[in-house]
Amino acid sequence: MTSSDAHQDSISERIDTSRPHTARIWNYWLGGKDNYPVDEEAGRQIRALHPGIVDYAQADRAFLGRAVRHLTADRGIRQFLDIGTGLPTADNTHEVAQRIAPEARVVYVDNDPLVLRHAQALLTSSPEGSTDYIDADLRNVDEILDIAAKTLDFTQPVALILLGVVIFVGDDEDPYGLVRRLVDALPAGSHLVLSHTVTRPDMPDVDEAVAFWNANGTPKLNQRTPEQVTRFFDGLELLEPGVLSCSRWRPENTAGAEPAEVAMFGGVGRKE
């Protein structure tokens, strides 16, 4: 057995197929194949509680593409630190960025063993650019920054991407402090791209779906109000139109109609 085979075996041992996992359910909602029957069943039950869940999974993914395209084409960003990557699907961060700027460099971070097993799909790159993958938890800020510095130049602007990942950090773990430590390590001209599930009085089905998930799945989710999500951008210049439904952040090809609102809110902020 080669060291690579042994590494893959150790990763496989970390994959628990007896309980649904959020990354695999997300993959199921996005039409992917990297999930198990337990994830599909949980995904169907959550969709029954909150029929719009597939729409906001898709809206969050589309938000990533629009934000990366804007930062690459209009803001000149050439470096991306994508934490909470999730399972590879169409138009991953490096694919979107390198389509515009082949020299773009991207570092992905995730601690999900199934994502790690698929990391090779994320490590493809244009000849001019580069990609890397770090097996680490969002909470391990110093480790992430130390390893990412082998690929990224932290004296030049970086786009920090935190899509649907801070929801796994409880209030007792200082989520705002974690995000602030990451942003503080980046130079002026860097950007934060963040999305988060929200709780709001007019969206009770979301609360019910999250309660079901926390009783049956892993890891646990933490909901926050739109105002609490906006707090993650404190000290940054919020780009228009601010923090709002991901579907409504600079939508494309809408023919003048405002997209339907989803319970995943996001925004982009610039560090001065």
Image (cartoon, rainbow, N blue to C red):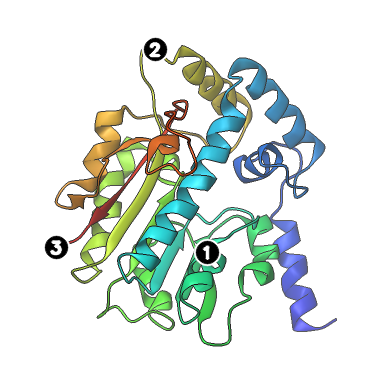
Which residue was labeled with disc 2? Answer: 202
CA neighbours of label 1 inside 10 A, class few (<14), some (14 to 19), many (20+): many
Q: What residue type is labelled 2?
A: Asp
Instruction: Find the residue positioned furthest to the front.
Output: 255
State the separation of the CA atoms marked 3 and 1. Answer: 25 Å
Residue 135 in sight in this render: no
State the separation of the CA atoms marked 2 and 1. Answer: 34 Å
* Badge number at residue 11: none
Q: Where is residue 122 in the image (x, y as percent from the top left)?
A: 62, 68
State the separation of the CA atoms marked 2 and 3. Answer: 35 Å
**Helix, strand or loop under label 1:** helix
Q: Earlier in the sequence, mark 2 or mark 1?
A: 1
Q: What residue type is labelled 3?
A: Glu
Q: Position of residue 54 (x, y in %)?
A: 61, 31
CA neighbours of label 3 inside 10 A, class few (<14), some (14 to 19), many (20+): few
Q: In which quarter of the image is residue 76?
A: bottom left
Towards the viewer: 245 or 38: 245
**Helix, strand or loop under label 3:** loop
Residue 216 in sight in this render: yes
Towards the viewer: 115 or 105: 105
Which residue was labeled with disc 1? Answer: 96
Which residue was labeled with disc 3? Answer: 272
Q: What residue type is labelled 1?
A: Val
Q: Quadrant of the N terminus?
A: bottom right
Q: Which of marks 2 and 3 is nearer the N terminus?
A: 2
Horizontally, residue 56 falls left or right of residue 119, namely left
Q: Which of marks 3 and 1 is nearer the N terminus?
A: 1
Q: In which quarter of the image is residue 264?
A: top left
Towards the viewer: 10 or 231: 231
Question: Closer to the camera: disc 2 or disc 1?
Answer: 1
Q: Position of residue 95 (x, y in %)?
A: 57, 67
**Residue in the image at 25% along x and 45% along y:** 240
